[in-house]
Image (spheres, helix red, strand yellow):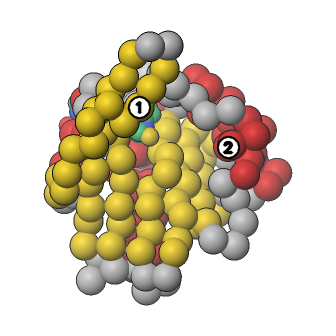
Amino acid sequence: MPCGNRFMIMHSISKLKLEDLNLAYNIEQASQAFPWTEDIFNSNQGKNYFNLKLSDNFQIVGFAISQLILDEATLLNIAIHPKYRRCNFGRHLLQTLIQQLRLRGVVTLWLEVRVSNVAAIALYDNIGFNQVTLRRNYYHRNNTSEDAIVMALSLS
Ligand SMILES: CC(C)(COP(=O)(O)OP(=O)(O)OC[C@H]1O[C@@H](n2cnc3c(N)ncnc32)[C@H](O)[C@@H]1OP(=O)(O)O)[C@@H](O)C(=O)NCCC(=O)NCCS
């Protein structure tokens, strides 16, 4: 989908609410090589989480899920529907999440990402995350494993 001027005029970012979860989970399934189960997706909501949705023309096309513990937060998940990628939506959603976490007193945002996830790593590099460490064989599925890169961004 050519982005055209969609980025400028047609999208909005707001809190992900319980009534959004079905549509957001559809995006999770369409987006991830290894999607969460719906139960896990629905359990990552509530008072210890700060979650946002990005809507284009009033339709949810992306979400970000973060967990807050004291003055640290972890980005647990972020996805933009495949049809809406490379329109700057992922960058804007993550930048908005970072601004909101900063206002809530978060000083460090952490995340883990598969080493094969070139798009996400490029997005995180682009935003300014630093690579902190590598967790060997962190992800397991069907007798295969993959390393995780741990990244952090200082918000202070
Ligand atoms: C990662 C993801 C959220 C990026 O969303 P997006 O809206 O397409 O990203 P943006 O258009 O905002 O891109 C911002 C920057 O990220 C980088 N980037 C994004 N997609 C990229 C790709 N496919 N290849 C290389 N770099 C990429 C670029 O630096 C880009 O800046 P540029 O367009 O000026 O070059 C999206 O690809 C996605 O949903 N992936 C599947 C889910 C996932 O892997 N989530 C992360 C792990 S939980």
- Screen quadrant of the C terminus: bottom left
Which residue is tagged 2?
Answer: 41
Q: Quadrant of ligand 1?
A: top left
Element assignment for label 1: strand
Q: Please state which amino acid type lies under the numbered disc 1.
A: Tyr
> Which residue shows up at 36% across the image and 53% down it?
111
Which of pointers 2 and 1 lies earlier in the amino acid sequence? 2
As drawn, the residue found furthest toward the right would be 19
Amino acid type, mark 2: Phe
Q: Disc 1 designates what residue? A: 139
Residue at 27% from the left image edge and 26% from the top image edge:
116
Q: Position of residue 78 (x, y in %)?
A: 48, 45
Q: Residues within 10 Å of mark 1 (few under 14, many from 20)?
A: few
Residue found 52% across the figure and 71% down from its top: 68
Give left or right: position of 67 versus 85. Answer: right
**Residue at point 73%, 35% (across, down):** 38
The alpha-carbon separation of the residues under discs 2 and 1 comes to 18 Å
Mark 1 lies within 8 Å of ligand 1 (Cβ measured): no
Q: In the rendered view, tell whether residue 64 sits above or below residue 104.
A: above
Disc 2 and disc 1 in contact, CB within 8 angstroms? no
Quarter-wise, where is residue 135 in the image?
A: top left
Q: Is residue 120 visible?
A: no
Q: Is residue 138 visible?
A: yes
For mark 2, give the secondary structure. Answer: helix
Between 65 and 83, the one lying in front of the other is: 65
Q: Is residue 69 rendered to the left or right of residue 39? A: left
Where is residue 126? Give x, y as percent.
19, 50
